[in-house]
Image: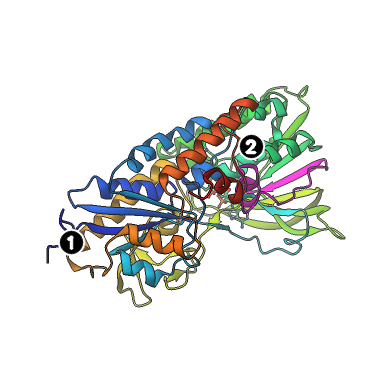
Amino acid sequence: MPELGTQERPLRVAIVGSGPSGFYAADALLKSDTAAQVDVFECLPSPFGLVRFGVAPDHPKIKNVIRVYEKTAANEAFGYFGNVDVGNDITLDELHQYYDAILFAVGAATDRKLNISGEDLEGSHTATEFVAWYNGHPDYRDRRFDLNTRIAVIIGQGNVAVDVARILCKTTAELAATDIADHALRALAASKIEEIYMIGRRGPAQAAFTEPEIKEMGELLDCGVDLRAEDLKLNDASRAEIEDPANKRNKNNVEILEAYLARDDSARQRRLKINFFQSPTALHGARRVERVTLERNALSGDPGRQKARGTGKTEDLACGIFFRSVGYRGVPLDGVPFDEDAGTFANEQGRIVGSAGTVIPGLYCTGWIKRGPSGVIGTNRPDSAETVAALLADCDHLAAAPRRDSGDLYRSLRERGVRVVNYEDWKRIDAAEIEAGRAAGKPREKFTRVADMLSILGDA
Ligand code: NAP
C-alpha cells in the first residue's frame, strides 16, 4: 500500500469552516510537498466566513483578500462542500470514514457575557448579532433592532465596537453604496439614534481599537466625537505604557483622542461619545432596556498590567438600545475537547488534545477556535501554517480513512437530501449577487436566505 501523502495515495483532509483560517490552512496544505486532497465543509452555501459576515460593509478593501482564497479554490485538489452542517448533516464519525485528518476552522461563533442583571432585557443585544444582521447572515437576518430611540450604548472598545458605532453613526448616503444587507440599510435609514456611547472599562491608553479605525470616526459626514477631558488625564503607569516604543499604537490612539477633544465639530448632528473608566453594573427597564447603571473605575497595577476596579461611584444613563461588544467566544462541538476558560478547542499548536493533554490523532484546529478571538485576518495565515506543519509532521502516523473518494461522499449527501453547494455552484450564486447589486449601485446584493441562494441553482 503506498504511503499517505503520495500521488498514489494523497492525504485526505476535511477542513470544517471556510473563513480565513480555513482557506489559509487549505492553501498551506495544497502548497506543501505532500500530495493532498482538501475538502472544505461550510454550513452555509456561501464561503469566506467573517470576511463576508464580519468585515464591515464600508471596508470593502479588506474583502479583496477573497481573491487570494479564490486562487486556492481553483486548485484541482480543492473541494467545497457548502450547505453541509458538520454535526447535523454529517457526523464526525462519518467524516473520519472519508478523511485521514479533520481540521476545524470554525471560528468563535458566540460572545462573552457581562453577567449583569438586566442583560437579557429586550433591547440588549450582542455586537455579534448586530454585525451578522447588517451583513446579511441568514441566521440573523430576521433579528429586530429597535433604532427608533435616541441613545445607543455600546460596551467595549475593540474594533468590533468601533464597527458597530460607525454603522450607527453613518448617514444613509455613506452606507448606500456598500454591500450592507438591504433590510439593514432600510432600518438604519429610519434610525432615530442621535447619541452613540462607546464605553470602555479602562482608559484611552489601554483601548483595544486600532488607529485607522478610531481616526475614521472623525472623518464621517455628520458625526462629531465627544470625550470627557478628565478621561484623557493619564496616570503615571498609563503614561509609562504609552512611552514604551512597543506600545506606539496606544500612544497614537491617545493623540488621536486628544485631537478630538481639542476640535470643534459641534455642527455635526450625530454624536459619538467615547467614555472611559466605566463598567455597566445593571440594565433597567420595565419591559425593555431604558437605562444602564455605570460604575466609575480606577486603574491599578503595574504598567502593561493595569486592571479596572470599581470605585463605588455610579451614574445612570438613559438608553433605548444596548450592545455588548466584549469579545467573541468559541462554541463546543460534540466529540471535541473544549477549554472552558479560553473558549477554544483544547489544543497544542493546533493538535487537539484530550483532558490528560494527550493528542487526539487526526484532529486539528486553527484560527479563533484555536487561539481565541484576536488578531486581524492576516494573523490567520501563520496560525494555519503552524497547524498544517503539525498535521504534516504527523502524516506517517495517521490512520488512513477507509473511503477515499470525495465524489462518493458528495453523492451520499445528495441522496439523503442535503443540497451540497460546490464551488461552481457558489460562483453562480456569487454572480447573481453581483448582478443584483449592479442595479442598486452596490458591489453586490447579498442573498440573506439560504433558500434564495439555492433557488439560483435550480435542481442541478
Ligand atoms: P477585542 O479587541 O478583544 O476588544 C474587546 C473589548 O471588550 C476591549 O475593549 C475589552 O476591554 C472589553 N471588555 C472585555 N471584557 C469586558 C468586560 N467584562 N467589561 C467591559 N469591557 C470588557 O475584541 P473585538 O472588538 O471583539 O475584536 C476581535 C478581534 O477582531 C480583534 O483582534 C480585532 O482587532 C479584530 N477586528 C479587526 C477589525 C479591523 O481590522 N478593522 C474589525 C473588527 C474586529 P479590556 O481591554 O479592558 O479587556
Give the image location of residue 124, x and y in percent. 73, 55
Label 2 environment density (alpha carbons within 10 Å; few <14, some 14–19, many ≥20)? some
Disc 1 marks a residue whose amino acid type is Leu
Camera-nearest residue between 266 and 29: 29
Q: Which mark is residue 34?
A: none
Queried whether the magenta region covers residue 257, the answer comes back as: no
Secondary structure of the residue carrying numbered label 1: loop
Of the 4 image quadrants, the one containing the N terminus is bottom left
Give the image location of residue 26, x and y in percent. 32, 49
Give the image location of residue 112, x and y in percent. 59, 59
Q: Please give the residue where the numbered disc 1 appears in the rendered image.
A: 4
* Sooner in the amino-acid sequence: mark 2 or mark 1: 1
Label 1 environment density (alpha carbons within 10 Å; few <14, some 14–19, many ≥20)? many
Alpha-carbon span between mark 2 and mark 1: 60 Å
Give the image location of residue 132, x and y in percent. 61, 48
When asked about the image quadrant of residue 414, the answer is: bottom left
Write the residue at 52% across / 37% down: 210
Camera-nearest residue between 303 and 400: 400
Query: Dominant secondary structure of the magenta stretch?
Result: loop
Write the residue at 60% across / 50% down: 451
Q: Nearer the viewer, mark 2 or mark 1?
A: 1
Secondary structure of the residue carrying numbered label 2: helix
Residue at the farthest bottom position: 356
Residue at the farthest front position: 459
Magenta stretch?
A: 128-157
Q: Please give the residue where the numbered disc 2 appears in the rendered image.
A: 232
Disc 2 marks a residue whose amino acid type is Leu
Q: In this rendering, would 116 be left or right of 426?
A: right
Task: Classify mark 2 as within 8 Å of ligand 1 or not, answering yes or no.
Answer: no
